[in-house]
Amino acid sequence: MEAKELRIGNYLKTDRECQDDYVEVVEIYNENYFCTCSAGLNYQKEHVKPIPLTEEWLVRFGFEIDFYGGQGNVTYYAKKGKFKLYSIEDDKSYQYDWTKNMFVMIKNVHQLQNLYYSLTQKELIWKKYI
């Protein structure tokens, strides 16, 4: 994963010992980035990777199910707005309907965070307890 894909505040996971479900990007410098967990432990880019986007992450970000479609496809929407995601069951990813003809595919948590911020100018915050 390249630094240009990330923003400060993006959530990633680590292959190191960590008490949290995620680490957060706290610094981006040229081609490097650094992450930290709530215990204050720091991780370099060699020890972090993207978090696959799942229904649990969507719910914790505040998305709700809007529609159950056929073959396991589900539409999620953000409570505060018209931001809708469509699940793609075969691909284990989600798509955002940018226009009626163009879709943005989202597979990882940081991609959703970045797209949501770009469109709404608001951060998606993960709720530890729901």
Image (spheres, rainbow, N blue to C red):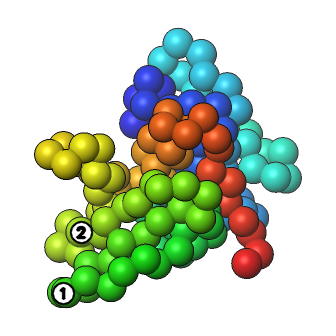
Identity of the residue drawn at 29% across and 44% down: 98
Classify mark 2: residues with Cα within 10 Å, few (<14), some (14-19) or many (20+): some
- Residue situated in front as seen by the camera: 112 or 30: 112
Q: Secondary structure at mark 2?
A: strand
Residue 25 in percent (x, y) is at 64, 37
- Residue situated in front as seen by the camera: 63 or 113: 63
Q: Which mark is residue 121?
A: none
- Residue situated in front as seen by the camera: 41 or 11: 11
Residue 112 in percent (x, y) is at 46, 49
Identity of the residue drawn at 57% across and 31% down: 7
Q: Is residue 37 in view from this perspective? A: yes
Mark 2 belongs to which amino acid? Ile
Q: Is residue 52 in view from this perspective? A: no
Classify mark 1: residues with Cα within 10 Å, few (<14), some (14-19) or many (20+): few
CB-based contact (under 8 Å), mark 2 and mark 1: no
Q: Secondary structure at mark 1?
A: helix
- Closer to the N terminus: mark 2 or mark 1? 1
Residue 45 in percent (x, y) is at 53, 35
Identity of the residue drawn at 84% across and 45% down: 40
Residue 65 in percent (x, y) is at 46, 78
* Among the 4 quarters of the image, the one containing residue 75: bottom left
| Residue assigned mark 2 | 88
Identity of the residue drawn at 50% across and 44% down: 116
Residue 84 appears left or right of 25: left
- Residue situated in front as seen by the camera: 35 or 56: 56
Mark 1 belongs to which amino acid? Gln
The residue positioned farthest toward the top in the image shown:
30
| Residue assigned mark 1 | 71
Q: Quadrant of the N terminus?
A: top left
Separation of marks 2 and 1 at Cα, in angstroms: 10 Å
